[in-house]
Amino acid sequence: ALRNASEQDPKLPLTFYIDQYRDQIGLRVLYQQTLFAAERMRCLLEQYEYLLQQVAADPFRRIATYSLVTPAARALLA
């Protein structure tokens, strides 16, 4: 979930909150709208989610082999 600075005054320009809900983990981002666009924050969350999926699927890979380029972004780059 995205939260902008008008909903809660953040102390920092960008803050991540990770919450556990029973058997799931949720990620929230609080950001200052004057510094970040909502679309950029959505992309950032997608990148982070993709990274976490890769780590969960194969946690013993070398860090350098994981990618922040999502499949959707890769299609745009091709």
Image: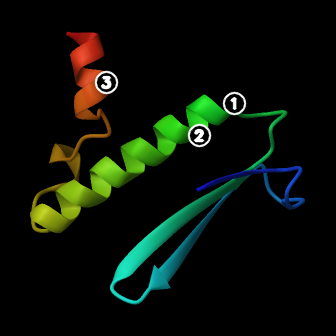
Which amino acid type corresponds to the residue marked 3 in the rendered image? Ala
Q: Is residue 1 above or below residue 19?
A: above
Picture coordinates of residue 17 (x, y %)? 60, 69
Asked if marks 2 and 1 touch (Cβ < 8 Å), the reply is yes
Q: CA distance from mark 2 to mark 1?
A: 6 Å
Q: Residue at x 19, y 67 (%)?
A: 56
Residue 37's disc is: 1
Q: Which mark is residue 21?
A: none
- The answer for how far apart the CA atoms under marks 2 and 3 are is 15 Å
Name the residue: 27% across, 12% down.
Answer: 77
Q: Is residue 20 left or right of residue 78?
A: right
Local secondary structure at mark 3: helix
Point out the tag, 3 or 1, that comes first from the N-terminus. 1
Quadrant into which the N terminus falls: bottom right
**Residue 73: mark in rendering:** 3
CA distance separating discs 3 and 1: 18 Å
